[in-house]
Amino acid sequence: FLSSSQVFSGAMTRPYREMDKPDVREGAGLLLVEAEQVLQASLEAVVIVRLGWLFSGRGPSRFTSVLDRLRAGKPIAASDNIRDCPVHTAEVARVVSGIVDQLAVGAPDRGIYHYGSAGDTGWFSFCEAAVAHASQREPFGNAADLLREDTDAAGITINRSLDCAAIRHQFGIQRRPWRDFVERAVGRYIELYCKEEPN
């Protein structure tokens, strides 16, 4: 079952471990907590993988929303007060495949594991990486001028970074840097959504 770092409130300053009790009080995170509990209570064998922010160059997501705004020439204000471990959807496929392969040869078939790509980051820094790649291509030539740090967001940091040591120890899955996937995601977005308008 694919779950999310949203099961945590983000109040901790260190990365969340699998044994930390989910403490979110509302929204999608609460639904995920309930789903995890139902599965664990109902099934003998269930592997739950909690993931960091998902991003991809296709479909509705926070990542494509950023690129939509940049393409429309609209400014973006972002803050590093929100922290997580981004994960490209291709990484999710690799991780799930690795777990399934290990289960097929006798790995434990019950437990909770965390996976976020290497390099936890703030939302502003993540947007900066997207802008850096997008601004090298059309129609994003002025993208760098549209991103600004939201200084009004000072205050409590929401940290949903994940400690991913257990998935490496149990299944041998190594973390790959999220930055390695940003250019790919930007390219996919351009390929799908930035076709030239006919004259």
Image: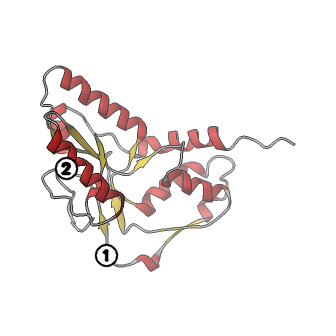
Quadrant where the C terminus is found in the figure: top right
Instruction: Locate residue 41, reporting x and y percent.
Output: 15, 44
Instruction: Locate residue 80, reporting x and y percent.
Output: 39, 66
Q: Is residue 95 above or below residue 143?
A: above
Instruction: Locate residue 174, reporting x and y percent.
Output: 25, 36
* Amino acid tagged 2: Gln
Q: Which residue is mark 1?
A: 156
* Amino acid tagged 1: Ile
Q: Quadrant of residue 20?
A: bottom left
Circle 2: is it few (<14), some (14-19), or many (20+) Cα within 10 Å?
few
Q: Is residue 23 left or right of residue 70?
A: left
Q: Which residue is mark 2?
A: 37
Label 2 vs label 1, nearer the camera: 2
The residue located at (44%, 56%) in the rendering is 126
Instruction: Locate residue 108, reporting x and y percent.
Output: 12, 31
Circle 1: is it few (<14), some (14-19), or many (20+) Cα within 10 Å?
few
For marks 2 and 1, give the CA distance.
29 Å
